[in-house]
Amino acid sequence: MTRPTPTPKAGLIAAMLIFVLDQFVKWLVVGPLAIGEYDERELLPIFKLQNVHNPGVSLGFLKVAPENAWMLVVLTGAIACAVLVWMWRERNRQDQVALGMIAGGALGNILDRLRLGYVQDYANLHFGDWSPFLTFNLADAAITIGVLILLVRALLVRDKPKAEPGEVENSNA
């Protein structure tokens, strides 16, 4: 008899936290900090806030006109739904959190596309004149980290199957 999958509380909390924090920082950049498009504010010697409108997918690929942003909303919405279903079925808490990070990031970027027609990016990590990444946002970072966690766990971490109640573990394996 299989046990029902518990509600992925940790994943749902991660999704909500990523979504809210990302939207809050986006609001700060364009609101109280009043950073204009392509303006920047140096916070650390290696990090600055910028206001970049990204009409494309990750890293600015596949740029689309604002009137066609609905196509990316549909695509990322379908992916977000699949991730949420996976998260709900997943039994491993670390995977649930990683999936929550992906879902929260996707939902944050979807909201931007629905409201603005583009994704609001604001984070620029740089070393002098060299930036290893294009300008990104917390949602992008959460998606990337969530995917990396899933990949590392899938490729390098072997979870031992838990014995069902009433089963005796075989220690001679």
Image (spheres, helix red, strand yellow):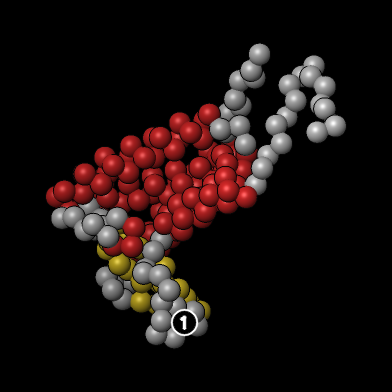
| Disc 1, SS | loop
Q: How many marks?
A: 1
Q: Which residue is mark 1?
A: 127
Residue, x 25% and y 47% (percent of image)? 72
**Residue 63 place in picture, x, y as percent:** 21, 58
In this view, the residue farthest toward the front is 173
In this view, the residue farthest toward the right is 172
Residue, x 68% and y 39% (percent of image)? 159
In this view, the residue farthest toward the top is 1
Residue 41 shows up from this direction: yes
Q: Is residue 101 above or below residue 32?
A: above
Residue, x 39% and y 85% (percent of image)? 129
**Residue 133 place in picture, x, y as percent:** 40, 70
Q: Is residue 105 above or below residue 137?
A: above
Q: Amino acid at mark 1?
A: Phe
Along the viewing direction, whichever of 130 and 38 lies nearer the viewer: 130
Q: Is residue 79 above or below residue 25?
A: above
Left or right position of 46 against 109 = right
**Residue 97 place in picture, x, y as percent:** 57, 43
Residue, x 40% and y 35% (percent of image)? 82
